[in-house]
Image: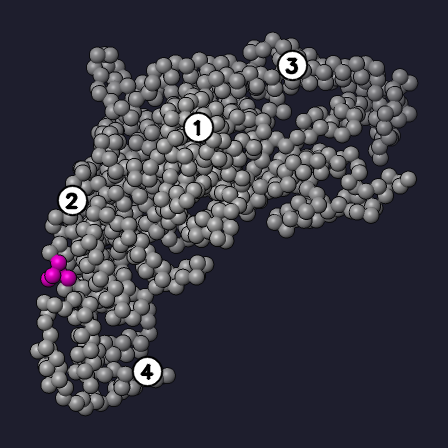
Amino acid sequence: MASASSKSPRETPLMRQYLGIKAQHPDAILFFRLGDFYEMFYEDAELVSKALDLTLTSRHKNTEEPVPMAGVPHHSARGYIARLTEQGYKVAVCEQVEDPKLVKGIVKREVAQIITPGVVLDDEVLDPKAARYLAAVAYEGSGLGLAYLDVSTGEFRATELPSGEALAGELARVRPAEILAGADALGDDGVMAPVCRLYRDGVYTSIKPHTWKQAETLLTSMLAGDSRALGLVDAPLAARAAADVVSYARATQPNGVLPVSRLQLYAPGQAMVLDEVAIANLELTETLIGAKRAGSLLSVIDATSTAPGGRLLRRWLLYPLTEVAPIRRRQDAVGYLVERASLRSSVRHALDGVHDLERLSARVLLGVATPRDLGRLRDSLALLPELARLLSGQAEGEPASDLVEVPELLGFDGQVLEILSVLQAVLARALVDEPGPLAREGGFVRDGYCADVDESRRLATGGKDAILEIEQRERERTGISSLKVKYNRVFGYYIAVTKPNLDKVPADYVRRQTTANGERFITPELSELEAKVLGAEVRVLEREQEILGELCDEVTQRAACLREVAQRIATVDSLAGLAEVAHVNGYVCPTVDEGEVIDIVEGRHPVVERVVPPGSYVPNDCRLDSAGAQFLLVTGPNMAGKSTYMRQVAHIVLLAQMGSFVPARRATIGAVDRIFTRVGAADDLARGESTFMVEMRETAAIVREATRRSLVVLDEVGRGTSTFDGLSIAWAVSEYLHDAIGCRTLFATHYHELTALADSRPKVRNVSVAVREHEGEIVFLRQVVEGGASKSYGIDVARLAGLPRSVIARARQILGQLEDGTSWHKTAQLSLFGIAQAAPPEVVEDTAGPVMERLRGLDPHRTTPIEALQILVELCEQARG
C-alpha cells in the first residue's frame, strides 16, 4: 500500500471535495475557501496566475502528481474577482458553511455565488450611475428577440428587432456586459456573427436556449401572471430571450431570489432610435477621444443626487420620447421645480441622504445584504416623509386648504409610504446607529431589542471583566508582575508566564504550551470562565444572525413597495436635476409638437458653452421645415464651428424629447423619430474597413433607414476618395435625401460646388459660418449666416495648426495656379531647403473651338447633375490641353 506522502492528491478528502464542486462548475474559476485564503488548483490556478500576475505554487509537492496552486487573501478577493470578470471570466465563490472549530474532519463547503461579467453585485465594482446588464438574444428566421436584466436592481426589459443591424444598434444603447446566445448563433456562420463584429464591447457566452413553451412556463411562474396578460404571446422571441436571461441569472445566485417582479416589453419605435454611430458622434455618454464621461452631454445635464436618479437620467437620454403627451408631462414637472427655487433646493438636499434603494432592496432578496445595507435602508426610509411633505404642494406654515397642483410625476403614494414607515420603525428599533459591514462580526443589534442578545452580552461582558480580575489576582498571588491572561483561537484563554518567572508558578497551574519566551498555563477557574464567556459570545453571534434573517424577511415582504418608491425617488431626482441644470444654465422650455418644423432661436451647444469663457459663446438660429427649408447646406472653413452648430441642433432636439429644458432663447421641436449622424473620418481596421468604407457604410444606413420625420446630420460625405468621386457621391446623396426621403437635414461640406443645389432644389438653403479677414489673418466669427461660403481658408487653418512657412507658401502658390487653371504639375517641386521658382507658364494650344462646339450640342434640361459634372471635368481637361 502506498504511503500517505505518495498518495495521489486526487485521493485526499480535501481534493476530492474540491474536484466534486469543480465538476459542477466546469466553466467557472473556482475560488475555494481554505481558512483565510481562496485557493485555486490545477488549470484554474495556471489561468489565474497569468490573468492576475500571481505566484504559481503547488500542493502535495512530494507526490507523483503535484497540484498547481494559486491563492488570494479572502479580505482582498473582491478586487481580484473584479479583475477576472472584467477580462470576461466567470468566478464561482465556494465558502465554508461550517465552523472549522466545531467540526472534525473536512469542513462542508458550498458555492455561495457565481460572478460573471454580466452578474456583479459588489458595490465597489458597480458604477453607481450606470446599469450592469446581462442580455440574451433569441432568433427564428430573420426575427430577433433581445432581453436584458440588471441583477443588481431587478430592471428587466425585452424587445423584438427586425435585423442584425437593428440589434447591434440596440446593444450599443443598452451596453450589456455579457450577452447570451445559442452556440449555433455564435458560430462563424451564425446569426450573431455580424452582430458580434458590430458590437464588440460585451462578452459573448454560449447557452442552451429555451423553447417558446419552456419560456412561457418559466416566465408565467416567475411573474405570477397569464402569458397573454403579460404580453408574452405577442412577443415570443423576446419572451424566449427573457427566459434565457433569468435562467442563467438564477443559476448564479443559489442562495437568493432574483429581484424581478415585472418584464417590460417595448418596441424600439416607442422611443427615438439612436444607433451606435449617433451615440458616439454626438458624445452622449462619453467622449470620442478617450471615452471619458467628462465632456459628454450626460456629464453636463446630470445633476442628480442619487444613484438611481443618475441611472434613470442616462436611460432618458438614450431613449428620448417620441410621443408629445409624456414629453410634456416631464416638462411640466421640470418647470414646476424651476419656478420654485426654495422647494428645489430642499428636495435636492433631502435626496442627498437617500442611498441606493434599488440595489439595497435587491441585495436583500439575493441574500447578500449586510447589516450596513439594512442600516442604509433604514436611514433612507426615514427621509421619505419629509420628501413627500415637500412635494405635497403645501408650503410649510400654510393651511391645508392652500394646496398647489403638483405634477403627477412628483407625487408619492401615501399607502406605500405608510407601509414603509412600519418597516423603517422595525429597522430603527433593531439596528445600532452605525451597523458594521460584516454580519459575522456581530454587534449590530441594538441593546434592548432582544432579551436573549442582551443577556448573552451581559454574560460575555461580565466574564471578560472577571478575566481581568483573575489576571490582577494572580499577579498578586504569584508575585509575577508581568503575568498576563491572553486568548487565541487555538488554546482559548491562558495564563502567559515568561521564563525568568517560571519558578514562581503555583502548583495548581496546568501547563498547556511551551513557547520561546516562556510557558502557557490554565487553571480550573479560567477554563470554567472561558466556557462561560465563549459560550455567551457564540450565542450572541448566533442570535444576531437569526435577527438579521428576520429583518431581511421584513424587507422582502415589502419588496414591491420598496421598488415602487425607489423608482419614484429616481424620477423626482432626475426631474430636480434637470430643473437645476435649466436654472443654472439659462435653459428654456421648448415647444414639442407633432409638426415637422425645428425652429431654434439663439441655440447654444450645451457642452461647448460650459468650457468657453462665460458669455463668449455665440448663439445661432436654425430652422428646418419639411415644407420649406428642409435641407441646410452648411459651408465655411475648418475650425469655424460647422460641426458645433450641427451637433448643438441634435443635442437640443434630444434634450427636448427627453423632457428637458434646452439651451436656447426659444425652440419649437417637431418630434423626431430618429437622429442619424455621419461625422468626420475614421477607419475600423478590426472590421477590415477603410476610412472611406466606414464613411460609405454609415451613409448607406442613413439613406436606407431614414424617414421623413428623421433628423440627419452629415458632416462631410465623400471626402475619403478622389475629389470628383466624392463630389459626385455627396451630390447624389443630397438629392436623394431631398427628393426621395424629405427628411430634415444638416449637411456640412467643403465641396462649394454643392451650393448649386439650391438653384434646382426648392427646399435646399445655403448657410455658412462667417469669417472675417483682417490684415492677412482670419477671424472666426462663429455666426451662421445666409448664403454659401466663397472659400475654405484651408491653408490659413493649416498655418494656425503650425505647418512650416515653406509648406504654407508653396501651398498658396499651387492654389493660385489651380484657381487660374495653370498646369501645376509642370511647376518646380519643393526643394529640400526652400521654394524653387515656378516654371514659366506652358504654351497651351487654343482649344476654344472644340469646347464651344461640344457645348452647342448639349441639352442642359436633359442632363443629370452627375452627367453635367463629368462633362465639365472633360471640358476643363480639354481646355487645358
Residue pictured at 77% horizontal, 43% vertical? 59
Q: In which quadrant is the C terminus drawn?
A: bottom left
Q: Residue 743 in the image: x percent, y percent?
A: 20, 50
Which residue in the structure is indicated by mark 4? 830
Q: Residues within 10 Å of mark 2 (few under 14, many from 20)?
A: many
Q: Residues within 10 Å of mark 3 (few under 14, many from 20)?
A: many
Residue 422 numbered mark, or none: none
N-terminal of the pair, mark 2 or mark 4, is: 2
SS assignment at label 4: loop
Q: Specify the segment rendered in magenta.
A: 757-761
Tag 4: amino acid:
Leu
In front of the other: 383 or 729: 729
Tag 2: amino acid:
Val
Residue 760 counted in the magenta span: yes
Q: Is residue 486 above or below residue 157?
A: above
Extreme-top residue of the structure = 451
Tag 3: amino acid:
Arg
Q: Whole-Å distance between the Cαs marked 2 and 3? A: 74 Å
Which residue in the structure is indicated by mark 2? 597
Which residue in the structure is indicated by mark 1? 358
Residue 457 numbered mark, or none: 3
Tag 1: amino acid:
Glu
Residue pictured at 18% horizontal, 79% vertical? 876
SS assignment at label 2: strand
SS assignment at label 1: helix
Q: Residue 127 in the image: x percent, y percent?
A: 46, 39
Between disc 1 and disc 2, the foreground one is 2
Q: Is residue 367 visible?
A: yes
Residue 589 lies left or right of residue 184; in this view the side is: left
Q: Is residue 468 above or below residue 59?
A: above
Quadrant of the image occupied by residue 111: top right
